[in-house]
Amino acid sequence: MDRSLLRPTGWARVADFVQLMRLNRPIGTWLLMWPTLWALWFASEGVPGRKVLLIFIAGVYVMRAAGCVVNDYADRHFDGHVKRTRHRPLATGRISETEAQLLFVALVAAAFILALLTNWFTVLLSIGGVVLAFIYPFMKRYTHFPQVVLGAAFSWAIPMAFGAVLGYVPFEAWLLFFANVLWTVAYDTQYAMVDRDDDLKIGIKSTAVLFGSADRLMIGLLQIAALALLAWVGLRVGLGGFFWLGLVCMAATFAHQQRLIFHRERDKCFQAFLNNHWSGLLMFAGIALSWWPITG
């Protein structure tokens, strides 16, 4: 049967494109947003300028949407075999492959225009972000570490933020970058634990598959390492009590996530993944309050 016959027409198609870009599921946007805001506040040593803040907020939404589109395009022949993803628009044929390709190009073009509003150093850095976003979905075919590539993609806004504000990328930016990579691998392993049974059947690789029964231990070690790098940044910059309170609160969310994934139940693992929104938010609150302008 012609799969195009399954597609709605007119405005009824909007819902499918919203679903393809995950605009109806903001968790990924927030997980990309928080480290971006961390970096902007660090780079600016306080509240960043309105222009650069708006550029990066818009960039987060655009690049997260682009990443979701290329992810579903790469997985279009696999999603139908996974319980959680079998109703996605590309898997069901409600959106065509050509439409997905054109949408990805349009989103990347929009992101590039936003980068042009900063400086040429940031524009050059943005190329790396696009490459990482494009290759990540295909890595699960070849390596058990696609989460590492995702971590780099989700962290690339950090050097870009420093580049946009300072014109260069200091050592502290790279500490933030690697801290966020470790955190991303931890929470995306929680996410991969939800699909592990299906992934094993169809041959998809992930850190959840690689770690096996050591998954909880590895997630814990990754979380501890991320906290250690964040603490190193705080010490180097000399931030005050609010930063350390935010770090402690982030650690508390990690402890809660360990409790959730203890029995490796699908729903609980997904709840643990979602809880990382609060991890990033609490860390941002600590950073922002530490840099809060002190007035008379």
Image: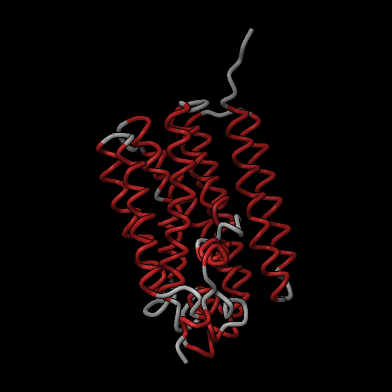
Q: Quadrant of the C terminus?
A: top right
The front one of 117 and 165 is 117
The figure's colour scheme reads secondary structure
Where does the image place residue 82, in percent across and percent down from the top left? 57, 83
The answer to whether 187 is drawn above or below residue 55 in the figure is: below
Residue that appears at 62% across and 11% down: 295
What is the tally of numbered marks visible in this picture?
Answer: 0
Whether residue 229 sits left or right of residue 167 in the image: it is right
Judge from the rendering whether residue 68 lies leftward or rightward of residue 281; answer left or right.
Answer: left
The residue drawn where x is 45% and y is 88% is 2
Residue at left 62%, top 82%?
83
| 57 and 179: which is toward the camera | 57
Asked if residue 205 is positioned above or below residue 273 in the image, the reply reads: below
Residue located farthest toward the top when viewing the structure as drawn: 296
**Would residue 157 appear left or right of 197 to someone viewing this image?**
left
Q: Which of the pair 229/249 is nearer the observer?
A: 249
Residue 58 image offset from top left, x and y in percent: 47, 43
Q: Is residue 243 above or below residue 219?
A: above
Residue at left 48%, top 83%? 78
Tell me residue 107's x, y (percent): 39, 55
Q: In this picture, is 67 found above or below 4?
A: above
Residue 202, given in percent of the width and then of the height, sits at 50, 89
